Amino acid sequence: MTDDPDMTGDRTPPSLEEIEARLRRARRNAGIVTSSPDPGAEVDTRGGLGFGFRIGVELLAAMVVGVGGGLMIDRWLETAPWGLVVMFFLGAGAGVMNVFRAVTGAGYAVGFRHSAEAEGSEESRQDEGRGHRG
């Protein structure tokens, strides 16, 4: 036992890179195979039929929300059928955008870029400034 109440001593905690390297080394020694080379990477396990259903659900859900919102606006403001018409087109536009993002793999981050590009290397992010990195 040490006399230090928080038991940290003078040691600094290891960096995340050191911890990742130690985990990889331990997994390799134990014979554990990970599903992807990058533990943080998303693995695409869905098949064609599942992806097709996702596309249909994305489009249908956005249009149902748009039509439902349009009906509520029409009932509230007594503007039938204009709220329904406007919200139908907004819902359809949102659905098409959701389908586009699903098909291209853009995700829901800001902008239309692939998640691999969003993480990118330091060279690909030169124009983003230095900001907070922690």
Image (cartoon, rainbow, N blue to C red):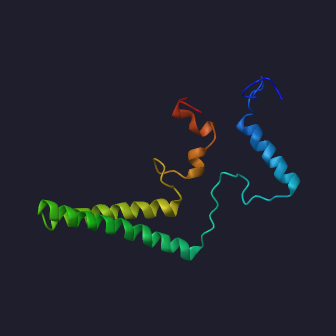
The residue that appears at 46% across and 47% down in the rendered structure is 110
Q: Quadrant of the C terminus?
A: top right
**Image coordinates for residue 75, horizontal then vertical, percent:** 16, 65
Quadrant hosting residue 10: top right
Please state which of residues 107 and 125 is positioned toward the viewer in this rendering. Answer: 107
Image side of residue 134 versus residue 112, left or right: right
Depth order, front residue of 107/113: 107
Front residue of 13/79: it is: 13
* Farthest residue, direction bottom: 49
The x, y position of residue 32, in whole percent, is 82, 58
Q: Residue at x 85, y 53 (%)?
A: 28
Q: Closest to the observer: 103 or 30?
A: 30
- Looking at the rendering, in which quadrant would you find the N terminus? top right
Position in image of residue 5 (x %, y %): 73, 26
Q: Residue 8 location, x and y as percent? A: 75, 28
Is residue 1 depicted above or below 119 in this figure? Answer: above
